[in-house]
Image: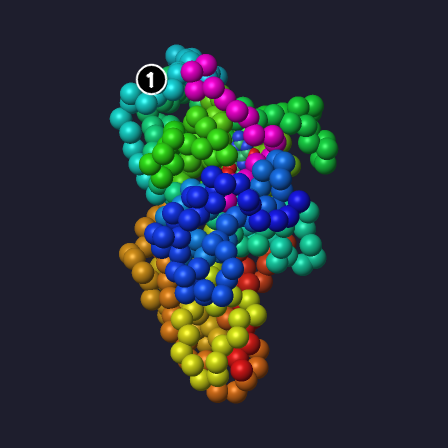
Amino acid sequence: MVGREVDRRAFLGVAAASLLASRSWSQDSNSPSPPSRIVREFEPQNLESPLSVIEQAITPTALHFVRGHFPTPRLNAETWRLWIEGAVSRPMELDLASLQRLPVVERAVTLECAGNGRVFLTPTERGLQWDQGAVGTAKWAGVPLSVVLERAGLKAEAVEVVLEGADVGEVRDPKSPGPIAFARSVPVQKARSDEVLLAYAMNGEPLPVAHGFPLRAVVAGWYGMASIKWLKRIVVTDRPFHGFYQMFDYSYWDRSDGVPTLRPITRMQAKAVISRPVRGQRIAAGSTTEIRGAAWAGEEKIAKVEVSTDEGKTWQHAALASRPERFVWTQWHYRWQAPNQPGPVKLLARATDDAGRTQPLHRNPDFRSYMIHHLIPVEVVVR
Ligand SMILES: Nc1nc2c(c(=O)[nH]1)N[C@H]1C(S)=C(S)[C@@H](COP(=O)(O)O)O[C@H]1N2
Ligand SMILES: [Mo]
């Protein structure tokens, strides 16, 4: 089911958000309604953000994308427990109040769904047909996973930390082993860094149900699938986890050993997205137009964003709105002098991270239907 969200609470949130900063709505005032999320799927709930959200540092909660695989679990904060078991010296059960008594850490993190941009793949790939709005940045607050693991005491043989959600379902294609919970793992090294948060608040409010109430993981720098919502159980394992969403879904072909082998998707790839002008926008010949958007690079920092208006023959530096940081996007802009001759023009933006990796011009089919970070042009019409 595809359509605009009409939920009243969401509408109020949108109204507040647009007062804050939604320049795209106030400036392009011929748009009939404030921005709202696009329903990609009604049940399970999958909502896409309007692309204009990437122009702001923090995405208002009511506009943040939502990705769910199974019906949304409605958990009771009083009776909810987090179980920690497996290769730990002290298996334990924690309630929300005791987690909230631990020192709180707040961090802005950009989450991008590994399938963001899938609608641009040719031939069409199976899965939700996201445009480029399955990405957002929120301020997440909670307890570092490392603090909880420290309390439980990792055994020497610990290799991975499996995070399991309370949402359960049966998958038909490929067929799951009966009903399964949504689960993913992070290696012990990442789990012990301060880069994984067990969050109970989003943008200064208790975690909304859609985003994982009462507790979710936020795995900074990785695609969204690792950030398990409605967290129920943490299982420390002595070998790599090969669960459904680790191997069947959210995996890609790696050829670095010479033989293609499936690897779980982890770190976000460098990516720049153009929010304005929009596809098909008419631009007056010879006028000066601002091209803008955001760029992110997961665990790396953005080193530069470049723009090309001649199909990649030449590239110009875009200006960054803030000093790039790991784990969060950076807004960028570039003043473009449109040509005097009318006709279609393809706008391209590309990001380079500080490890020197630049976005590729062409799609890597080994990424299957995920990690869509090749260059996707925005065609405008000069007239
Ligand atoms: N328990 C659970 N956690 C989950 C999912 C899910 O379906 N169930 N979806 C994952 C995926 S694929 C993404 S992209 C992010 C999206 O987080 P958001 O809905 O808060 O934007 O949640 C992740 N965590
Ligand atoms: Mo995702």
Q: Secondary structure at mark 1?
A: helix
Give the amino acid type for the residue marked by disc 1 in the picture: Ser
Q: Position of residue 310 (x, y in %)?
A: 51, 77
* Front position in the image: 106 or 75: 75
* Looking at the image, residue 19 lies above or below residue 265: below
Q: How many marks?
A: 1
- Residue 314 visible in this rendered orientation of the protein: yes
Q: Is mark 1 within 8 Å of ligand 1?
A: no
Q: In the drawing, does residue 149 fall left or right of residue 49?
A: left
Q: Residue at x 32, y 23 (%)?
A: 100
Magenta segment boundaries in residue numbering: 65-79
Q: Position of residue 215 (x, y in %)?
A: 43, 27
Would you identify the image quadrant in which residue 288 lies?
A: bottom left
* Front position in the image: 336 or 301: 336
Q: Position of residue 332 (x, y in %)?
A: 37, 62
Specify whether residue 345 is painted magenta: no
Would you identify the image quadrant in which residue 322 lies?
A: bottom left
Q: Residue at x 47, y 61 (%)?
A: 275
Q: Which residue is mark 1?
A: 98
* Looking at the image, residue 142 lies above or below residue 89: below
Q: Quadrant of the N terminus?
A: top right
Q: Residue furthest left?
A: 103
- Residue 350 visible in this rendered orientation of the protein: no
Q: Position of residue 374 (x, y in %)?
A: 54, 59
Q: Residues within 10 Å of mark 1 (few under 14, many from 20)?
A: few
Q: Residue at x 48, y 53 (%)?
A: 35
* Looking at the image, residue 371 lies above or below residue 160: below
Q: Residue at x 37, y 66 (%)?
A: 333
Specify whether residue 67 is painted magenta: yes
Most common SS among magenta residues: loop
